[in-house]
Image (cartoon, helix red, strand yellow):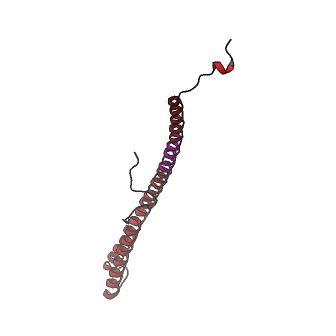
Amino acid sequence: MPTPSNSRKTKSPKDVINNVKSKISGQISVTQDISEEGVYVDMQMELDIRREHLIMLRSNNEGRRDYAKKTFWLTVSWIFVILATTILSGLKVFILSDAVLIALITTTTLNVFGFFLLVMKYLFSTREGGNPLISKRKIS
């Protein structure tokens, strides 16, 4: 009958070395897994930031579209008021002196187009640099 000490196999030095190597490579694998997980989390955060930036840009575009339409119609109506004033003054419905009419048309026209230009430059500005939170590397 085999005794417990006899049933045990004695390990050769080669087996012991292989066993230690497998344990060490297991630890390296865990370290690599943790490192890869950190990279994955970083990439996921960057992807979330990009998504939020895209949502913000879409919202800005909707607002710009809305304000551009309102500014356009304000400018058109303002020009029609000036046109109507000029026509009514020409038909002698009400009388404005030439100096007043010239001043009215000139200043109002400059104000209308200046206002339109100012609003459009603000709404559709082309800022350099983009979002500083988004890195320039590509996500694959």
- Of the 4 image quadrants, the one containing the C terminus is top left
Counting from the top left corner in percent of width and height, residue 129 is at 38, 64
Q: Reply above or below: 93 against 28.
A: below
Residue 70, by quadrant, is: bottom left
77 versus 102 height, above or below: above
The structure residue drawn at horizontal position 41% and vertical position 48%, both measured from the top left corner, is 139
Residue at the far top in the pictured view: 1
Residue for point 34% across, 78% down: 110
Residue 6: image quadrant is top right
Magenta segment: does it hold 58?
Answer: no
Q: Which residues are magenta?
A: 29-45
Q: Residue at x 34, y 77 (%)?
A: 109
- The quadrant the N terminus occupies is top right
Residue 38 in the magenta stretch? The answer is yes
- Decide whether the magenta segment is chiefly helix, strand or loop: helix
In the rendered view, would you say 100 is above or below 30? Answer: below
Front residue of 87 and 66: 66
- The structure residue drawn at horizontal position 51% and vertical position 48%, both measured from the top left corner, is 38
- Camera-nearest residue between 112 and 97: 112
Across and down, in percent, residue 25 comes to 50, 38
